[in-house]
Image (cartoon, rainbow, N blue to C red):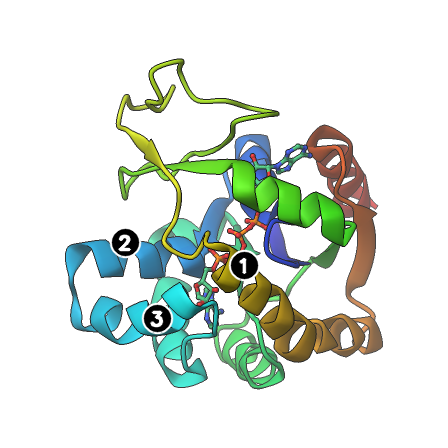
Amino acid sequence: MKVILLGAPGAGKGTIAKLLTDYDGSVQISTGDILRAAVKAGTPVGKEAKAYMDAGGLVPDSLIMKIMEARLQEPDCQKGFILDGFPRTIPQAEDLKKLLTKLSITLDLVVNLDIPREVILDRLTTRRTCSNASCQEIYNIKSNPPKPDGTCKKCGSPTIQRDDETEVAILNRLETYNQKTAPLIGFYRKEGMLKDFSSLSSQETVEGIKKSLKK
Ligand code: AP5
């Protein structure tokens, strides 16, 4: 599958992307995970991105497009990909359209994950993420806790709260989403690519996406 997941912070993009990769081996590409790994490794990209991320703002479009142009040409993308957190602005969506044309890739579906704001706030304050950059499994202390000692069930590394999980950063991320990312819903609806899904139950959402892909 070649799918884009759109949704506010905490809508469940990462959770659903991971479930979809089990379906047909398509690879999850999360620009957030790529950037967090770069920050942790202290690369030039990570150094440039960190301040934007911690404040809940967006990393510049030019930097993201450089990352994604390279990433989409890696061999594992040939089986299919699930874009999680990209594109996030109209210029990124326009550049992605040009890039996909250049690479002769056709998208199957753009998924819009719909979720009430109070659920988002609750989910983001209770999320825990595996600190191992090559794992980054997502947990929630209410709905899907890590091991009782706080370590990851998959790789055993400690789970942590992300640097952008402060109340101020969460509110900024939601504001940034409303201003910069929500307009993509109209962009992809116009292109005839968009489908809306409630994101309250991840399993039901995944089943709905699979059904849409089979049509
Ligand atoms: P990114 O990592 O993409 O963050 P985000 O969009 O804010 O999304 P989240 O990862 O917070 O949430 P999610 O929707 O994946 O939800 P999750 O599945 O974890 O980006 C981080 C930053 O990087 C950005 O702020 C920006 O600075 C930068 N960046 C990234 N991409 C960029 C781009 N393209 N351009 C510019 N800048 C970019 O779920 C949340 C919680 O809810 C978890 O605890 C989970 O367990 C729980 N949960 C999920 N589903 C359910 C359910 N059905 N029931 C109960 N609990 C659930």
Do the residues bearing badges 2 and 3 touch, measured as CB atoms within 8 Å?
no
- Helix, strand, or loop for circle 2? helix
Q: Name the front one of labels 3 and 1.
A: 1
Q: Name the front one of labels 2 and 3.
A: 2
Residue drawn at x 26%, y 76% is: 48
The Cα atoms of the two marked residues, 2 and 1, are separated by 20 Å
Q: Which residue is mark 3?
A: 67
Whether residue 17 can be seen here: no
Specify the quadrant of the image occupied by residue 3.
bottom right
Relative to residue 198, is residue 91 depicted above or below? below
**108, 177: nearer the viewer:** 177
The Cα atoms of the two marked residues, 2 and 3, are separated by 13 Å
Sequence order check: which comes first, mark 2 or mark 1?
2
Tell me where residue 88 appears, x and y as whole percent: 57, 72
- Helix, strand, or loop for circle 3? helix
Q: Which residue is mark 1?
A: 170
Horizontally, residue 179 falls left or right of residue 151, namely right
Q: Which residue is mark 2?
A: 37
Q: Amino acid at mark 3?
A: Ile
Horizontally, residue 60 falls left or right of residue 18, namely left
Find out if the beta carbon at label 1 lies less than 8 Å from the nearest ligand 1 atom.
Answer: no
Disc 3 packing (10 Å; few <14; some 14–19; many ≥20): some
Q: Amino acid at mark 1?
A: Ile
Horizontally, residue 202 falls left or right of residue 114, namely left
- Helix, strand, or loop for circle 1? helix
Q: Amino acid at mark 2?
A: Ala
**163, 190: nearer the viewer:** 163
Relative to residue 33, is residue 19 depicted above or below? above
Tell me where residue 62 appears, x and y as whole percent: 39, 84
